[in-house]
């Protein structure tokens, strides 16, 4: 084991560019995609191609599933615009159960990919520096490690936290891979259900000549349960803080 670690360290010293290449590629593709794909990954594009997509789904269901998951994976892994459109499309094409399943699968795989890319390069360097630091930064990292699962769940459940931030930040501070995967797969289910549910009724919205109203996400009946789950995720942190102050 020690010899393997030494080999990894030697490889990292010899090929520092290779360690940072995946994250650099993601940043480059994300920047290009932000300017070139915004007009294509939209509800207007979905409206114009709805009949063709439904016909292809009915004729080649397995191929449609594979293509959908692959495209959604690329959108998330490279932080491209259109993640919300993809989630709604999952409900439109596959219904609430299968749509949610495929949405969660694709988004989770994409999140894992960007997490690994960030951790492989910049994340290792930053995590090592935080471990070696003193003072406030060290306390923050120790506090995060102590409450890792709760904090990661909060990042997934609080709607104000952008999805790409919840993918990148954990990698940069050295959270455990298994905890990231667990909280990602479970933590995105509530939001995925909401987006998929909007997609289920998308056909009727298009028939009226309208576009999906994503402001529904901020309606009390939607946001209240998400905030409730966020409070539940934060509860262990609050309990530990109270016990620490009281010396329990």
Image: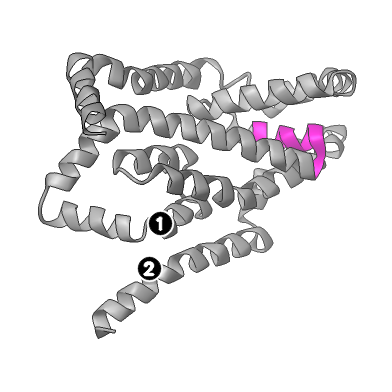
Structural crowding at the residue carrying mark 2, measured as other residues with C-alpha within 10 Å and reported as few (<14), some (14–19) or many (≥20): some
Local secondary structure at mark 2: helix
- Label 2 vs 1, first from the N-terminus: 1
The residue under the point 38% across, 37% down is: 168
Residue drawn at 29 percent across, 21 percent down: 20
Marks 2 and 1: CB-CB under 8 Å? yes
Residue denoted by label 1: 151
Judged left or right of residue 122, residue 162 is right
Measured as percent of width and height from the top left, residue 165 is found at 41, 40
Total number of numbered discs in the rendering? 2
- Closer to the camera, 99 or 82? 99
Tell me if 98 is positioned left or right of 17 in this view. right
**Visible residue check, residue 14:** yes
Quadrant occupied by the N terminus: top left
Q: Name the magenta segment's main secondary structure.
A: helix
Other residues around mark 1 within 10 Å, as few (<14) / some (14–19) / many (≥20): many
Image quarter for residue 26? Answer: top left
Q: Position of residue 47 (x, y in %)?
A: 78, 25
The residues tagged by marks 2 and 1 sit, at their Cα atoms, a distance apart of 8 Å
Residue at x 12% of width, y 45% of height: 132
Q: Which residue is mark 2?
A: 237
Decide whether residue 87 is among the magenta residues.
Answer: yes
Please, is residue 240 above or below residue 16 in the view? below
The numbered mark at residue 109 is none
Start-end of magenta stretch: 86-96
**Residue, x 35% and y 39% (percent of image)?**
171
């Amino acid at each position: 084991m020690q010899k393997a670690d030494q080999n990894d360290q030697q490889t990292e010293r010899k090929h520092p560019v290779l360690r940072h290449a995946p994250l650099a590629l993601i940043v480059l593709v994300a920047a290009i995609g932000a300017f070139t794909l915004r007009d294509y990954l939209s509800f207007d594009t979905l409206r114009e191609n709805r009949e063709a997509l439904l016909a292809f789904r009915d004729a080649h269901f397995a191929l449609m599933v594979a293509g959908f998951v692959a495209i959604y994976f690329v959108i998330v892994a490279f932080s491209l615009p259109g993640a919300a459109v993809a989630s709604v499309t999952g409900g439109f094409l596959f219904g609430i159960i299968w749509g949610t399943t495929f949405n969660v699968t694709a988004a989770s795989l994409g999140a894992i990919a960007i997490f690994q890319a960030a951790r492989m390069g910049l994340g290792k360097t930053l995590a090592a520096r935080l471990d070696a630091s003193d003072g406030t930064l060290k306390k923050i990292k120790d506090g995060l490690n102590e409450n890792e699962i709760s904090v990661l769940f909060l990042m997934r459940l609080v709607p104000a936290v952008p999805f790409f931030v919840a993918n990148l930040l954990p990698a940069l501070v050295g959270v455990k891979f298994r905890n990231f995967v667990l909280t990602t797969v479970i933590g995105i289910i509530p939001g995925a259900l909401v987006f998929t549910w909007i997609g289920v009724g998308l056909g009727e919205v298009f028939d009226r000549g309208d576009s999906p109203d994503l402001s529904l996400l901020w309606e009390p009946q939607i946001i209240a349960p998400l905030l409730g789950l966020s409070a539940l995720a934060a509860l262990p942190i609050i309990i530990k803080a109270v016990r620490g102050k009281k010396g329990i």
